[in-house]
Amino acid sequence: MEIKSRFSDKLSKILFLEVDKNKLGKIFKKNIEEEIYMPIKSEDIINKVKSGEDMDNISVIYFVEAMFFVLGADEHFKYNKYYLDFIKSTPESIKFIKGKIFKAIDEKLYEDAYIMLKGLINVEESKENYEKLLMLCDKLRTLDSIYKSEEISVINKIKNVYSDYSLPYLYESLIKREENNFEAALFSINNYIALGGEETLEITDLKISLKSISDYEKGKELIYDDPKTALSYLLPLIDIIKEDGVLYYYIAIAYRILENYEKAIYYLNEALNIESNMPQVINELAINYASLGNYEKAIELLRKAFEATKSIEICTNIIMCYLNCGNIEGAKQHFKIAQKMDPKDEVVLELEEILKKV
């Protein structure tokens, strides 16, 4: 269910009464030219109305509560312009609704509190109210992911109203981090700090974490196209991200592409020291030994990795190593295994043509 539908469902529980325009005019001291339907939210008041109690005996404050609710639940509701006028003509309305919002939060009726707070912002637009709205919306998002789009909408609205306000950038950063968009999350947290947001220890830790993850992602993306730049991102992370065998693995790949096989082997061994059961590391280690011409060592490692994974890629690597060291029989034996695993694999088909010629 989308937020709009959720709020519509909330509105369906409100009773709308057709009230005589003259009577409304006297209550709110306004000149009203058309009949208006007035909302009533309180169950007690609804029961009074249904039982036939005179409208004059119903406090105007009950209409005020429901009008705030309607303003927050549906910004395009037909009578909103009248509701705004009525609320503004009732001096005690803002203090009253703030009390209702506080009570709803205290009773964990967060959605009702949020809707009333949205309505309040139509009457009293302030940083304080927007801050409460954002915090409450973020709370709702943690309880129900349907509120994610709503929170993004609130963030963008606040940024448009207050261009120098830091808080929305903090919440934007948290959402971007959850989306694994670490570079955007880092950009937002930097904006938060640049606009005067308090840099607590938690914020500093968040910034460092996001920068590290962002650099990690950039480094991984650049490994094959620009391994030198990839290393400039990845190598400094060794001192920040402790005991991460995968980081060493990516560094080793970059060094292999740069044809620095000895360094690649060093970092792969470091990866295995952290986590010994990493078949992809063993496979990469074998590729580097093969690149140095040590096919026997490469085959030994590849066979070990193949036993653990039964990977077609590792099997074809074994075949290539056997071919390179002149062991045609070993190559043919493993080709039969690879062919059974996936006869249509592109590398298997290429190896089939090679083996036909030997």
Image: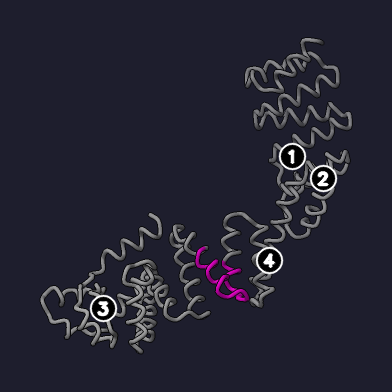
Type of amino acid at the residue the image marks with label 2: Pro
Residue 111 can be seen, yes or no = yes
Using the image as rendered, state which of residue 9 and residue 249 is in the foreground.
Answer: 9
Asked whether, in this view, residue 108 is left or right of residue 236, the answer is left
- For the record, the magenta segment spans 153-171
Label 2: which residue? 227
Type of amino acid at the residue the image marks with label 3: Glu
The residue under the point 78% across, 59% down is 239
Circle nearer the N terminus (4, 3) = 3
Q: Secondary structure at mark 4?
A: helix
Q: Is residue 226 above or below residue 77?
A: above
Label 4: which residue? 207
Type of amino acid at the residue the image marks with label 4: Lys
Quick one: quadrant of the C terminus?
A: top right
Q: Secondary structure at mark 2?
A: helix
Using the image as rendered, state which of residue 44 and residue 77 is in the foreground.
Answer: 77
Q: Secondary structure at mark 3?
A: loop
Number of other residues with Cα within 10 Å of mark 4, as a class: few under 14, some 14 to 19, many 20 or more: many
Label 1: which residue? 281
Image quarter for residue 1? Answer: bottom left
Circle nearer the N terminus (2, 3) = 3
- Identify the disc placed on residue 33: 3
Circle nearer the N terminus (1, 2) = 2
Q: Position of residue 205 (x, y in %)?
A: 67, 68
Label 1, label 2: how many angstroms apart (C-alpha)? 18 Å
Label 2, label 3: how many angstroms apart (C-alpha)? 74 Å
Image quarter for residue 21? Answer: bottom left
Q: Nearer the viewer, mark 3 or mark 1?
A: 3
